Image: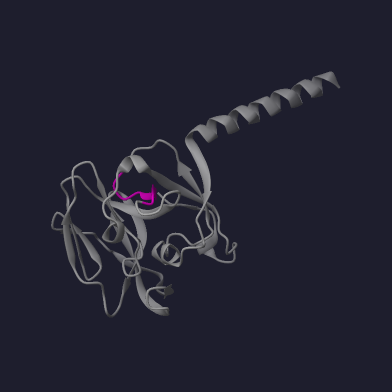
Amino acid sequence: MRAWLKVLVWLAVAIGAALGVLRLFFVAWRVPADDTLLSASIEPTLSAGDLVVVVRNASVARGSLLRCVDPDASGRFVIGRAIGRSGDLVELGSEVISLDGHRTPSPRACDPPTMTVYDPRTDEDVDLSCSIEEYSDRSFSALRAMHQQEPPMKVTVEPGLWFLVSDNRHVHLDSRDYGQVDPNTCQPIVFRLVSAAGFGDSKHRLSIIW
């Protein structure tokens, strides 16, 4: 009996220590569901209410999906893809990214190739095309309008800052809206633990974000 008790004590200590170490480097965070524009902008990678894992004190890498302090609202966060850093020329034409004159490769369509998203700016649903993009050794899905696309834009990233772009290029909440961000206010999102929508299809299963 004493031997089993010792095993249980040591097991509890080991689990507690492991959890303590994990909390030093990772934090679980639920994506807010009270901001309809944020909810639309993070599709199709994430959805409102998803429980995700965020890395503490990690450096920003090209192509990573970031949670950053909202420049316009204290205590809240924005989510965007790290695309351009200091000195980069970022262009968006036909809602497709070009970096220093080089277009982001889009080798194939998503499955399914289209998605309907609510646009709170117009209070209407909009049908968007979905394609897989490859950027800095990462592959991720991106949405863009089939008609009435966003006007083209071009910007050079300021020293020490990053330019973020929403995976939803059409219904976006990114650096086109709130400006370039300080990477010290950002943390990478690396894993989705569970979705508020459940596990009824592949989109809502456990998934690696990075």
Q: Position of residue 59 (x, y in %)?
A: 34, 38
127, above or below 139, in the image: below
199, above or below 193, in the image: below
Q: Residue at image x 40%, y 45%?
A: 188
Asked whether residue 60 appears in the rendered view, the answer is: no
Asked whether residue 18 appears in the rendered view, the answer is: yes
Relative depth, front residue between 8 and 29 = 29
Give residue 176's quadrant in the image.
bottom left
Q: Position of residue 117 (x, y in %)?
A: 43, 73
Q: Residue at image x 18%, y 43%?
A: 159
Q: Position of residue 54 (x, y in %)?
A: 46, 44
Give residue 110's quadrant in the image.
bottom left
> By what rule are the colours in the image chosen?
one colour
Q: For this view, does 55 lie left or right of residue 49?
A: left
Q: Residue at image x 36%, y 75%?
A: 128
Q: Position of residue 40 (x, y in %)?
A: 42, 67
Q: For this view, does 196 lie left or right of residue 96?
A: right
Task: Tell me, yes or no, whether the highlighted magenta stretch contains residue 196.
Answer: no
Give residue 166's quadrant in the image.
bottom left
Position of the N terminus, as image quadrant, is: top right
Q: Magenta stretch?
A: 61-70
Q: Residue at image x 19%, y 50%?
A: 157
